[in-house]
Amino acid sequence: MKFINKYLFITAIFIVIFISVAVLLKIEVESFAIYEANVKLDRVLTNQKALHGYIEDELKPVIYKLKSEKKLYEEFFNPKVLSFTYIARSVYEIENKLYRKNDKPELYYKLAATNPRNGLNKATEFEQELIDRFNKDKNLREYKNLTDVDGKKYLFFAKPVTPNKASCLKCHSDPEIAPQELRTMYGDVKGFHEKLDDIRAILSIKIPLASELRYGHEYYIKLLSIIFFALLIVYISIIYLLRRLDKKNEALYKLATIDQLTQLSNRREFDKDIYTSIIKAQREKSSLVLLMMDIDHFKNINDTFGHQIGDEILIGVAKIIQNSTREYDKSYRVGGEEFTVILKDIDKSEARSLAARIKDDVETFYSVDKKITLSLGMCEYNQEDDATLFYKKVDDALYRAKENGRNVLYECKES
């Protein structure tokens, strides 16, 4: 059981390590996608700022100069050259056409306004909420969050446009003071009636994460596969080394607890097992019988027929004992020619029959000039006895069997 638990524990550790690495890598992949989206966002904002600067600092002064030089009439207005909103939206529409052509996710770019001149710039409910929030708190510089649209992830960014200046009000306050062409093009409602310092719009951008997530996922699968196989190699190596160690430990355990000649458990193992068997019998109030056997005149057999024959007899007796006992009984060689058997959950009559069967089988198993016999002692455990007293009672019964003619079974005296 300990063997099984050890390997299950190691396997569980490696599974936990792999799952932890997989989760951490997944988080890193998403972090990478968000980082790349922020890089794209910085580029968009930089381009937007550059475009706004070009329109305000380069393009409009030229238009105003042409007006002042009477090369353009005073009421001239064309959003294609004077409206940053129009120009910026047109640029990103062209950019999105190129994205579609190359099968890439489109960028969402919008100057979302409360009362825009072009309906395409009408703020959504959430964008209007952000406009109100920016107007209430002028210290709020931006809003950024991850969002899902139709099951696709985006990095959403919103930033207020510069609050209305006095120069803005010519085109965005009272329509009566606005250029005639502007009124003719858009009417006198949309884009008008704004006030000084109002934030009339926000820059609303959604950066798609699809490409980054796809690339990140491919990287994730490759890296996770490498980690999996690396962990697998380490796992197999550890299991292999542990199995070798277990085999060595098992061999050492056998050397320490198994009699090498008969392959029965030895005296060291018997001393341990008799103690635990008594504890169990006391706890469960169950029966316990100890059987002790000694090969009669074994020294004479060794002296007469040699140690090789003696060893064969010891091995044969051990096999008879093992074949005669039940699967959950345990047999031991505790001395040169002395054997014991711990019999659990057995009554006296059944134990007597088992002992008699062993004795009879030993008499017929080996053919030498002298018959091989056993003397046996047997004792049923008394709940008041400890291991030492229990063993002494059986040993005394065996002694009486040897003193009274041998080849006989004696039971211990009731205390």
Image (cartoon, rainbow, N blue to C red):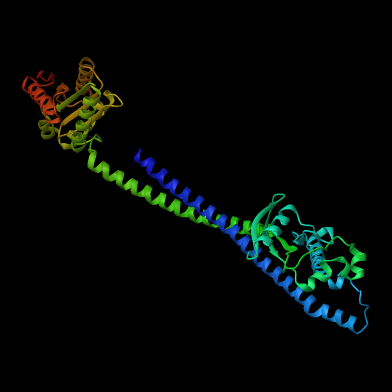
**Quick one: quadrant of the N terminus?**
top left
Please state which of residues 375 and 94 is positioned toward the viewer in this rendering.
94
Task: Give the residue at x 63% y 56%.
Answer: 217
**Quick one: quadrant of the C terminus?**
top left
340 w.r.t. 59: above or below: above
Can residue 111 be seen here? The reply is yes
Task: Give the residue at x 24% y 19%.
Answer: 346
Please state which of residues 371 and 390 is positioned toward the viewer in this rendering.
390
Give coordinates of residue 124: x percent, y percent.
75, 54
Task: Give the residue at x 86% y 60%.
Answer: 189
Give coordinates of residue 394: x percent, y percent.
13, 25
Name the quadrant containing residue 263. Answer: top left
284 w.r.t. 160: above or below: above
Residue most toward the left?
403
Q: Is residue 381 left or right of residue 227?
A: left
Give coordinates of residue 105: x percent, y percent.
74, 59
Please state which of residues 412 and 49 is positioned toward the viewer in this rendering.
49
148 w.r.t. 254: above or below: below
Can residue 295 be seen here? The reply is no
Please state which of residues 280 and 374 is positioned toward the viewer in this rendering.
280
